[in-house]
C-alpha cells in the first residue's frame, strides 16, 4: 500500500516559511533571502537543477541521491490553496510535480493541466476526500503532503501521515509559519529511521512507530 509522507525544509526555530512570504511583495521582511538560505541545499543539487531546468552542473552524492529517490517515489501531491497561489505565478510552464496535484480550497475551478504531466485538481470536500483521490492516482507509489504548514497539520491530526522527511537548515527565521502548531491529542508517535547531514542541512526521516 502506498505511504503518505511529508518532505519539507525547516528552519532551526521551527518555521516552514518566513514571515511575509508572498510573491506580491518579494522584498517584504527580506523573505526571499531567508527562503534561499533555507532551500539552498536543494537548489545546489544536480537532480534539482535538471528537474527545474536550471542548467547543467550541481552537486552529486548522497544528498543528490536522496533528492532523486524522494521525488521518484511520489505518485500524487496534496497542497493547500496558499501554496498553490504562490506557485501559480512562480512555477515554470512545466510545473515541477509531474503528477496529479490535489489542492485543498473553497474555490471551484476546473482541473488545470500543465505540460510535463502535472494536473492540478481543486478539491472542495476536505482533506479526507483529497487523500482518497490521491490514493487512486498514486497507485503503488506514495503520496506527498507538500504543504503548507496548516495542511500538514490537518493530515497529522487525521493520523494519515506515515513518514516525515525534514531538511533542517542552520538558519533562523524569527517568525513565520510554524510546522508543529494546532496539533490535537494524542499526537502520532514517530521514530528516527535515518539521518544524513552536510553543512547546508541535516536530513531527518521519521517513520510512524506504530506502523511497519
Image: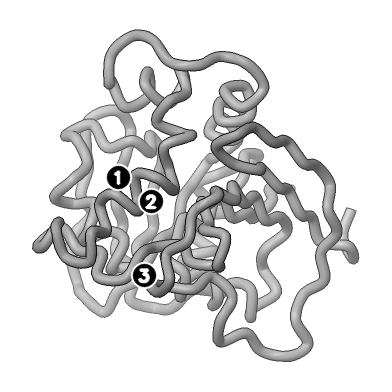
Residue 155 placement (x, y as % from top left): 58, 72
Horizontal side, residue 31 vs residue 169: left or right: left
Residue 7 placement (x, y as % from top left): 56, 50
Rendered view: 192 above or below 127: above
Give the residue drawn at x 32%, y 39%: 118
Give the residue drawn at x 19%, y 72%: 108
Give the residue drawn at x 31%, y 71%: 19
Residue nearest the observer in this picture, 55 or 33: 33
**Local crowd size for mark 2, using a 10 Å CA cut-off: few (<14), some (14–19), many (≥20):** many
Rendered view: 174 above or below 64: below
Numbered disc 2: secondary structure? strand
Rendered view: 186 above or below 78: below
Q: On the image, numbered disc 2 is attached to which residue?
A: 101
Residue 170 placement (x, y as % from top left): 55, 50
Disc 1 and disc 2 in contact, CB within 8 angstroms: yes
Q: On the image, numbered disc 3 is attached to which residue?
A: 104
Label 3 and label 1: CA atoms lie apart by 14 Å
Q: On the image, numbered disc 1 is attached to which residue?
A: 119
Q: Quadrant of residue 200?
A: top right
Foreground mark, 3 or 1? 3
Horizontal side, residue 111 vs residue 211: left or right: left
Give the residue drawn at x 90%, y 66%: 210
Horizontal side, residue 164 vs residue 171: left or right: right
Residue 85 placement (x, y as % from top left): 21, 61
Label 1 and label 2: CA atoms lie apart by 6 Å
Label 3 and label 2: CA atoms lie apart by 10 Å
Amino acid at each position: 500500500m502506498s505511504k503518505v509522507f511529508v518532505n519539507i525544509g525547516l528552519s532551526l526555530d521551527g518555521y516552514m516559511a518566513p514571515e511575509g512570504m508572498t510573491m506580491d511583495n518579494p522584498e517584504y521582511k527580506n523573505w526571499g533571502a531567508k527562503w534561499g538560505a533555507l532551500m539552498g541545499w536543494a537548489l545546489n543539487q544536480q537532480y534539482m537543477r535538471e528537474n527545474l531546468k536550471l542548467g547543467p552542473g550541481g552537486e552529486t552524492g548522497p544528498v543528490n541521491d536522496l533528492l532523486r529517490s524522494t521525488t521518484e517515489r511520489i505518485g500524487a501531491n496534496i497542497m493547500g490553496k496558499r501554496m498553490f497561489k504562490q506557485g501559480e505565478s512562480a512555477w515554470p510552464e512545466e510545473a515541477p510535480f509531474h503528477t496529479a496535484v490535489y489542492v485543498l480550497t473553497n474555490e471551484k475551478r476546473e482541473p488545470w493541466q500543465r505540460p510535463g504531466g502535472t494536473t492540478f485538481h481543486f478539491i472542495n470536500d476536505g482533506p479526507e476526500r483529497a487523500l482518497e483521490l490521491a490514493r487512486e492516482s498514486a497507485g503503488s507509489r506514495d503520496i506527498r503532503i507538500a504543504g503548507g504548514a496548516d495542511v500538514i497539520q490537518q493530515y497529522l491530526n487525521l493520523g494519515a501521515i506515515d513518514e516525515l522527511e525534514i531538511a533542517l537548515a542552520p538558519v533562523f527565521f524569527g517568525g513565520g509559519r510554524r510546522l508543529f502548531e494546532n496539533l490535537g491529542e494524542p499526537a502520532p508517535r514517530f521514530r528516527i529511521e535515518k539521518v544524513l547531514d552536510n553543512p547546508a542541512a541535516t536530513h531527518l526521516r521519521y517513520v510512524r512507530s506504530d506502523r511497519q
